[in-house]
């Protein structure tokens, strides 16, 4: 009788996952793994329901979204009974309101003064997982200096940037904290330079037409600018502020309170994606890397597969753990600057229960 029940369950799962209509948010690859499969360590993943639950996900479409894209394309969310509905945003701050009202269940973006202000004052969002860090060896963001200034010796370190024009992609976000930390090694602060805000593609143009002296692009723009011969890498982020938390996964309050089981299953799928990513780029498993690069070429703006062999990728913790210490450091900096006016209690904001559950299901990453 037990065997018959399991057969019926698997049959129904196959009907729902394989034969139903495909939406734009569903992966276009092969069939999803069967529910109840084993995790990375051989530990069984909890049996998923046979009916699908839609989860509304907001993301930016960047390389640090890799864990999400891998989990979508490889069917890990489907295996957990989850159908992902994607919405693109330009910043995490834009996700705050829809997360608060329940229009979005999950958000993926960078922490900022505005985000923490909103959490501290009005909207009890939860930071639940890593979505990008600059741990040692993962310095995907860099301070770049215009090549003519570097070659002439006019700018060779932080002290030489005083009074010069430096481009950031935004204010009151983690790159500004990183840049200020770099300047302070020479006794300067960010107020000692002329900061302009430019998109990453516009930074490349700014170097080419000599409108800026330095900038803080991320990959693949770092590698592309080096290839263009218009700027050089002065220092990478992991050499200045190793371990900085630069992006996070956010859960909306309704998702946490009303769909806790789904929230757990979402995290189990996401962590599997993170582990595939680390297999590819940390362990350098050639087969996994080829598979992951194909997924990233399909889903991110980096369409040149060869770039993945040359650029520095974002750090993604294989267990999804967030650096509370780094978030606290960023918050302290924004409070001192005055851009964050209300301190968020990170002991309540950062909620590890979901990554802890996922790790229990999947076993430790080896």
Image (cartoon, grey):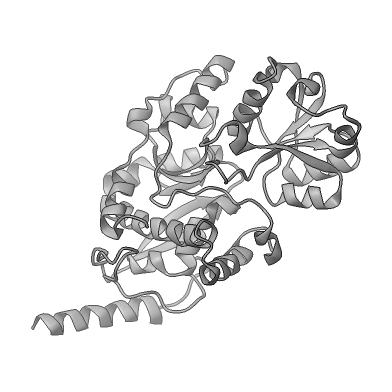
Quarter of the view holding residue 365? bottom left
Question: What residue sits 28% from the left and 67% below the top?
Answer: 42
Residue 103 image position (x, y, % from top left): 44, 48
Q: Which quadrant holds the C terminus?
A: bottom left
Question: What residue sits 61% from the left and 30% below the top?
Answer: 178
Residue 312 image position (x, y, % from top left): 63, 51
- In the image, is 140 to the left or to the right of 27? right
Q: Is residue 200 above or below residue 364?
A: above
Considering every residue shown, the one lying at the far left of the view is: 1
- In the image, is 261 to the left or to the right of 175? left
Residue 363 image position (x, y, % from top left): 29, 57
Q: Is residue 47 above or below residue 241?
A: below
Residue 343 image position (x, y, % from top left): 44, 20
Question: What residue sits 59% from the left and 16% below the top?
Answer: 337
Whether residue 174 can be seen here: yes
- In the image, is 303 to the left or to the right of 154? left
- In the image, is 111 to the left or to the right of 106? right
Whether residue 104 can be seen here: no
Count of picture labels: 0
Q: Which quadrant holds the N terminus?
A: bottom left
Quarter of the view holding residue 202? top right
Q: Nearer the viewer, residue 319 or 10?
A: 319
């Amino acid at each position: 009788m037990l065997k018959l029940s399991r057969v019926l369950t698997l049959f129904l799962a196959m009907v729902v996952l394989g034969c139903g209509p495909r939406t734009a948010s569903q992966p276009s690859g092969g069939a999803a793994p069967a529910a109840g499969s084993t995790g990375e360590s051989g530990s069984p993943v909890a049996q998923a329901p046979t009916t699908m639950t839609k989860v509304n996900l907001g993301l930016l479409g960047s390389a640090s979204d890799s864990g999400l894209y891998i989990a979508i394309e490889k069917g890990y969310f489907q295996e957990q009974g989850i159908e992902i509905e994607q919405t693109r945003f330009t910043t995490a701050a834009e996700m705050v309101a829809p997360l608060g009202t329940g229009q979005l269940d999950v958000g993926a973006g960078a922490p900022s003064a505005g985000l923490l202000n909103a959490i501290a004052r009005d909207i009890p969002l939860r930071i639940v997982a890593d979505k990008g860090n600059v741990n040692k060896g993962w310095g995907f963001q860099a301070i770049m200096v215009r090549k003519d200034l570097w070659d002439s010796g006019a700018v060779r370190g932080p002290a030489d940037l005083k009074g010069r024009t430096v481009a950031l992609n935004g204010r009151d976000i983690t790159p500004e904290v990183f840049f200020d930390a770099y300047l302070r090694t020479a006794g300067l602060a960010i107020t000692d330079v002329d900061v302009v805000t430019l998109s990453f593609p516009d930074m490349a143009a700014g170097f080419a037409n000599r409108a800026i002296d330095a900038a803080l692009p991320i990959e693949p723009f770092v590698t592309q600018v080096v290839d263009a011969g218009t700027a050089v890498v002065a220092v990478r982020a992991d050499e200045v502020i190793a371990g900085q938390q630069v992006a996070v996964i956010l859960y909306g309050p309704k998702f946490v309170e009303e769909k806790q089981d789904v929230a757990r299953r979402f995290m189990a799928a996401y962590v599997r994606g993170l582990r595939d990513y680390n297999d590819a780029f940390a362990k350098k498993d050639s087969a996994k890397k080829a598979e992951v690069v194909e997924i990233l070429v399909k889903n991110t703006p980096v369409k040149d597969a060869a770039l993945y062999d040359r650029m520095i990728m974002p750090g993604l913790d294989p267990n999804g753990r967030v650096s509370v210490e780094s978030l606290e450091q960023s918050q302290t900096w924004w409070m001192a600057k005055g851009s964050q006016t209300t301190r968020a209690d990170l002991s309540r904001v950062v909620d590890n229960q979901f990554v802890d559950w996922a790790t229990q299901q999947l076993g430790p990453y080896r």
